[in-house]
Image: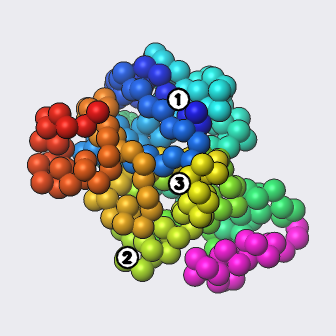
Amino acid sequence: MLLEIKDLAVEVEGKLVLKDIDLSIKEGETHVLLGPNGAGKSTLFLTILGFPNYKVLNGSIIFKGEDITNLSTTERVKRGIGVSFQNPPAIRGVSVQNLLKFESGQDVEKPLNNRMVDLSEKLKFNNEFLNRDVNLGFSGGEVKRSEILQLLAQMPEFIMFDEPDSGVDIENVELLAGQLNDLLDKDKKPAKRKKGGLLITHLGYILNFVHADKAHILMDGEIACSGDPNEILEDVRKEGFKGCVECAKCS
Ligand SMILES: Nc1ncnc2c1ncn2[C@@H]1O[C@H](COP(=O)(O)OP(=O)(O)OP(=O)(O)O)[C@@H](O)[C@H]1O
Ligand SMILES: [Mg+2]
């Protein structure tokens, strides 16, 4: 098991946002998290990453067999957890390439290594862009491409991506999905895949390009249903989240 969440309850700013969350993701698996606005999806990501404002009231988060519930974000990232944020902050005074060097363990005084230069070009970032401050004045699509470039610099074992397909045009979704597939070992046979992922998507568009093994619907801070991603998405499109959860088809 790569990630195991047991009976998790989380409070944010005095409000109980997540309760009774059980979620297990094996090596090589990609899961999808669906749910209405405000259900707690981003909160779950940030709790897995260990943001201090997100207070675990109950339960545990186990990563690669180790209880990380009380570890700092830095320690969790060191162990191989990576995230692409829904709304990452701008970092004035830090260039994209310096952040990439830091994330990939390169000397900041030396030029960006060839691997990262190639990946930047693949993601349509030129030199001028690499010198810009992180996320400052970036368009919605540029933010998402920059986030995935940072994940490629880190090469985490477990990847969380908050809405890779929102605000991104069709061509760029395909571009992002190609890199996401690489990050998730999708080019390898399922038994050989080591990486795992959890993606949040509202409309499921990204799933046309990235295969997911399981989907979960989060409603009011609880996992209301888990099952086959295509079946669940089809039902959500037809019936909405409430109707889908009431259908009792999923396990
Ligand atoms: N720092 C915070 N302070 C106060 N309330 C918060 C905080 N973070 C999250 N919440 C609340 O927790 C609930 C869940 O928020 P969250 O961002 O996890 O939802 P979401 O499922 O990601 O929604 P969306 O689909 O709109 O991104 C919301 O009601 C939100 O206002
Ligand atoms: Mg969110």
The residue to which callout 1 is attached is 4
Is the CB of mark 3 within 8 Å of ligand 2?
Answer: no
Q: Which residue is mark 3?
A: 84
- Whether 185 is among the magenta residues is no
Looking at the rendering, the stretch of residues picked out in magenta corresponds to: 109-131
What separation in Å lies between label 3 and label 1 (alpha carbons)? 20 Å
Give the number of the mark in front: 3 or 1. Answer: 1
**Residue occupying image coordinates x 70% and y 61%:** 153
117 lies above or below 156: below
Q: Earlier in the sequence, mark 2 or mark 1?
A: 1
Q: Which residue is mark 2?
A: 169
Give the CA separation, mark 2 to mark 1. Answer: 34 Å
Is residue 228 depicted above or below 180 in this figure?
above
**Can the viewer see residue 250?**
yes
Residue type beneath disc 3 = Ser
Q: Which numbered marker is on residue 111?
A: none
- Residue 243 locus on image (x, y percent): 12, 41
Query: Within 10 Å of the Cα at label 3, are there few (<14), some (14-19), or many (20+) other Cα atoms?
Result: many
